[in-house]
Amino acid sequence: MWFPAASRRSVLLGGLVLTGTIAGLVRPAAAWAAQPGFKVPPIIGCDAWGARPASDVVPVWDQRPVRIIAHHTATANVEDYSRAGAEAVARKIQDFHMDRRAWIDTGQNFTISRGGYVLEGRHRSLEVLRGGRQHVEGAHCTGQNVESVGIENEGTYSTVTPPDKLWARLRDMCAYICNQYGIPPTEIAGHRDFKDTLCPGDAFYAMLPQLRTEVANLLGEQLSERAARRASWPLLRPDSTGPAVEAAQHLLRAAGLVDVQPDGHFGERTAAAVRKYQQANRTEEVNGLIGGETWPLLVTARGADQDEVALAVRAVTPGGAVRASALPGMDEWKRLLSADRRP
């Protein structure tokens, strides 16, 4: 979304100031089995939509990104599908990011309007994408900016899905990015996969398996239903219910927040405990949501009460007890907590 906080990374390496490019390892691109069946979408560059100059050197890393992160702008679902409307949105985003967030430029690498116009976000993102060997560091998702391409999608998609024009451009844009960098379509993620945020909206997020499948098809690949779904951290919020909530409550108790009752209902007491936990762990947002930032902290906490951790595992493991000495690792936790735990 427009409003992710992102730390300003230094353009220093080994004590040397670099002139816009940060040295790093180049990851080999995947070799696709078939010729791409997609059309490279037209992309409106920063100069064409009237972007302001960046206020500092835009960091460019000598490595390919490994995933794409989809966002929504959390703005009105306007009916202005024109190019002029798309360019106005790009300018508003840049002004907000530079003037209110004090970032050097627009945070995301690309923006797609509701009318299906694709615009370059951060300067040099288009040039570098065309080269296929480097990546422009953005500011769209802290912890992921060096290795992920960020795409903002205009609108709010909590209860409604994106317009067809936006969806078609997003699909083509993801296929182009995946082809350029050798990114598997399974590595198309949502903002909430890494942060405690509603972004990119419930309705949009639910469509990501479809997006992965459609992008794979354009690249001449096939994804199984399971691969397209991929395990993900469930986003818990007030009034959420179920096994994942109960597991989170046990994990909060394991961390010493024993006022939480493990009843499987995310009430205010649980939300208050989550905010307290987030504050203690200095998460980016202290908002009481449990998403892609707080879950990894909870499941890997050191010094936690292992009996409570075992109860957390049991809550999401149908049919049996779990020994405290046989607790899952991060990937297994994610699978267990995922809303869809089919084999």
Image (cartoon, rainbow, N blue to C red):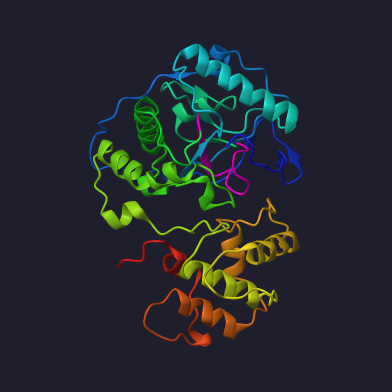
Give the quadrant of the N terminus.
top right
Residue 4 belongs to the span the image colors magenta: no
Residue at the spot x=36%, y=45% of the render?
185
- Region in magenta: 138-155
Counting every numbered tag in the picture gives: 0
Residue 32 vertical position relative to residue 169 in the rendered view, above or below: below
Q: Is residue 147 magenta?
A: yes
Q: Answer yes or no: is residue 57 visible.
A: no
Find residue 205 and report its horizontal and vertical position in percent: 43, 45
Q: Quadrant of residue 23?
A: top right
Closer to the camera in the image, 20 or 276? 276
| Residue that appears at 42% across and 37% down | 160
At x 66%, y 66%, the residue is 269
- The answer to whether 151 appears left or right of 341 in the picture is right
| Left or right relative to 214: residue 195 | right
Residue 20 lies, in percent from the top left, at 66, 30
Between 302 and 33, the one nearer to me in the picture? 302
* x then y, percent, for residue 197: 58, 48
**Image quarter hosting the C terminus:** bottom left
**Residue 187 can be seen, yes or no:** yes
Q: Position of residue 283 (x, y in %)?
A: 69, 56
| Overall secondary structure of the magenta section | loop
Depth check: 57 or 21 in front? 57
Residue 193 against residue 39 in the figure, above or below: below
Q: Is residue 84 above or below residue 66?
A: above
